[in-house]
Amino acid sequence: MPIANADSEERPQEDETLFEGVTQIVGPGIQRDLQTEVVLSFVANLLLYVVLIIYFAVTFYYITCKIVPYEFIDEKFHVGQTIDYIGGHWRSWNPKITTPPGLYLLGLLNYKWCHFFTSWSTLTILRLVNLFGGIVVLPLTVLRPLFLFNAIGFWPMTLMSFPLLVTFYYLYYTDLWSTVFILQSLTCVLTLPFGLNGSVWASSILAGISCLFRQTNIVWTGFVMVVAIERRAVIQKQFNTHNFNNYLKFFIHAIDEFRTLVLPYAVNFFAFFLYLVWNRSITLGDKSNHFAGFHLVQLFYCYLFIAFFSIPLWFSSSFLKIYKNRLLQNPFRYVLEILGIMLVIRFFTKVHPFILADNRHLAFYLFKRFLGNPNKMVKYLMMSPLYHFVTYCYFETFRPSEMVFETVAPIPIKEPIDLPIQLTHISWTALLVCTFITIVPSPLFEPRYYILPYMFWRLFLTCNAEPLWGEVVLVPQGHPPVTVSSTKRLALEFFWFMLINFFTFYIFKNRPIVWKDEPFLQRIIW
């Protein structure tokens, strides 16, 4: 249940991307030196990239050769299927595999290329597919073009270090390339590297390829299509402050430009429809353990993870003060919201047997001790207020980054490529709907399901320049304004991610688990 925008007028609106010159006035007596922030961002990312390449290469070698030089958890299915393809057994399919064969085709290509000049094991060669995608393709081809358009919004090296994604740099899983291809599809729409029409077709092809790694990416294909239509409609139909009219303009523009903006993605939707008819389910293989439901509490799990990872972005004394004032101004509303959350916990929590049976995932411990704790004091009285707060964080942190329009004045921008990397109320609604559709039907609590909801949320969010604690001390009128910056928050976000990565690596290395039916030590991952 969204709880955003209440009392939000107390926080100054900041248009972080549309500015003239190198200085931006963000409030009375407050300015930002954008040129300095951009320069610092480029220098920091260049230096950090060198450090991260070394870090991930060293840890990859250590994990692959020293800690788990054997197939780990679901790798036995993915590696086995790829070896079948390498051997030319194209009709072979492991019924335990639930995702399409995109990863196995990439693994096959990498094996064919690598085995001529290296004596590495097949497992190492296959794991290299994800390492290469994570430390080369993701930062350089996916994130770098967006960074050039919004250097004060995010750091590519930070998103490259996102803890839920980093886990799969070392393992042969589908999640990394699923993320890379669908985000690359979005990048094509926003940066238009192949022109107006060519970029939309490239985006559609990349989105279609991403569905070969994870079927639910067909939903995110719809989100990318909404963004593509919206960025043309904003200019050609002249969006204004009347939201309902903007929706009408959006649909009219989609009809007018069906061949150039809708048809490319409609090809993917039609192909996916044929897949559903053929397979009779969205899940390949093991359908009995992967069934759809209505797991509404998944939204709170998702918001909890997003709020946790984005602490450096939203945390400030003023943010906490606004939340407190919101509660004090209308405690009755707060009580009703808490009761609503409790009802969701009570009637829309699904407990999949996998989550209770596999202690090799951090999700097992989080669910057992907190999220699914049978103690009502924990499950309801502790978690309900927490879910309320993280939901507020999710919506309120994003609110200042939403694109706003004038009532009458025409939009001065003439080309979609010149628009800021921001969502309007239409694409923001689409993001919420796509997040709902992709996670709520799943009965299984899996943190990796929140990778794309986080990434799409974070890429369109521009970091604010509020101090972490305390207020900005304004100077008397007539004096130079106070300069604020988001650089510290962006740097803190990077170090926060790496701290989490160090912690999970420590757990992975130093807390092995013995399974009687497994010949090797088991370990804990996300």
Image: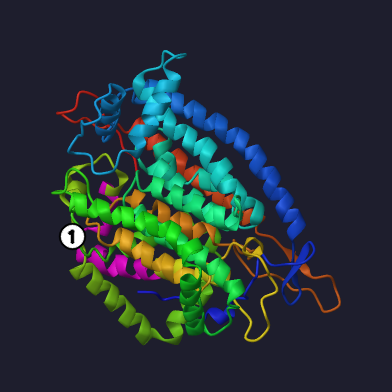
Does the image show residue 402? Answer: no
* Quadrant location of the N terminus in the rendered image: bottom left
Does the image show residue 191? Answer: yes
Q: Secondary structure at mark 1?
A: loop
Residue 382 among those drawn in magenta: yes
Asked if 50 appears above or below 43 in the picture, the reply is: above
Within 10 Å of the Cα at label 1, are there few (<14), some (14-19), or many (20+) other Cα atoms?
few
* Quadrant location of the C terminus in the rendered image: top left
Is 92 displayed left or right of 479 in the figure? left
Q: Amino acid type of disc 1? A: Pro
Judge by depth and name the residue closer to the eye, 321 or 225: 225
Q: Which residue is mark 1?
A: 374
Residue at x 56%, y 35% (from the top left corner)? 52
Residue at x 55%, y 53% (from the top left corner)? 199
Total numbered circles: 1
Residue at x 26%, y 63% (from the top left corner)? 378
> Which residues lie in the magenta part?
364-389
Is 190 displayed left or right of 268 in the figure? right
Asked if 370 appears above or below 429 in the picture, the reply is: above
Residue 170 quadrant: top left
- Counting from the top left corner in percent of width and height, residue 485 is at 69, 60
